Image (cartoon, rainbow, N blue to C red):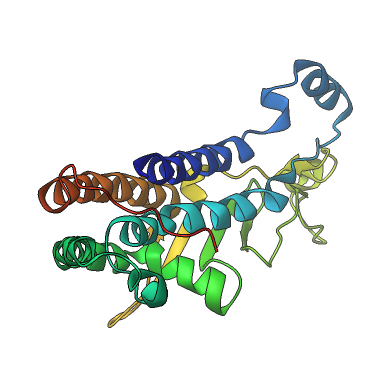
Amino acid sequence: MWNAVENKIAAADFFLSEMGRDLVPPEATDRTMAAIAASTGVVLGHPWQGRLYHHLDAFLAMARSVPDIVRCCFGIDPVMGRWLSTLDAGEIARREAFQRKFDKPFGLFKQLPLSGARNVTLHRQGTAPVEVQITGRWGIYTGGPLERIPESEMPAIIPGNDPASMWAQTLPPQPIRPRASDFWLLVDSTSGQARVELFPECESFLEQARQLVIEARAISQQEHGTAKITPPPAY
């Protein structure tokens, strides 16, 4: 059953990697199109806004599911009380002992900011509490999962601009390209809402999930040893 747990870790890692790939601009991977864009002034389409937030949702779901699967496979999941009652007394006792030791690291994991973001995303508002703020050539653009920002920009036409500004207005549109450091997780705290860099927080969350599995394996070895563990039902 540990393979199932590791599979979720791998899935979370995959979706986090996809988030990084979503930010790679098209001109960085297609030299032909980059040359055409450079010669014509056309802004290449960059559909990161239709991908990154979905990949973030999937990452949160996969990473946060890790301790739930561990609890169900090796400990006591209250939702599965009827099934647990069919197990022999020895296994139930071992599962209860596992759960008592697992509760503390599981509780700490549930307190992490991205555990809360997962609850907001899947059970409350439907989107992650994330903000992107990109500094372009002509302005600052703020958006999020439901608030798209433009793909390109041009300077505003203001009567009486100086000659340099007027010349800039003749330039082709400039692409607005996000970087990983432009994304922020919005975290509620007792002192108000804080902003935490999203990508480092995701990397930390995934590492915490990995460490939780290491702790769970050690607890399982202590309590279950080589004894038989009944896989949970698939329904």
* Residue drawn at the location 22% of the way across and 44% of the way down: 214
Image coordinates of residue 154 in percent, x first then y, are 78, 49
**Horizontal side of residue 86 vs 141, given as left or right:** left
| Residue sitting farthest toward the right | 40
Position of 49 relative to 145 (above/below): above
Q: Which sits in the foreground, 193 or 40? A: 193
Q: Against 24, is 155 above or below? A: below
State the residue at coordinates (46%, 58%): 184
Q: Nearer the viewer, residue 196 or 110?
A: 110
Q: Is residue 153 above or below residue 146?
A: above
Q: Is residue 223 left or right of residue 156?
A: left
Instruction: Locate the C terminus and report the quarter of the image it occupies.
Output: bottom right
Residue 80 place in picture, x, y as percent: 40, 72
Q: Is residue 91 visible?
A: yes
The answer to which of 215 and 224 lies nearer the viewer is 224
**Left or right relative to 46: residue 114:** left
In this rendering, the count of numbered labels is: 0
Q: Nearer the viewer, residue 61 or 217?
A: 217
Q: Residue at x 37, y 45 (%)?
A: 1
Position of 158 with respect to 9 (left or right) is right
- Pinpoint residue 87: horizontal percent, then vertical percent: 31, 65
On the image, the x and y values in percent for residue 124 come to: 55, 79
Q: Quadrant of residue 177?
A: top right
Residue 195 seen from this side: no
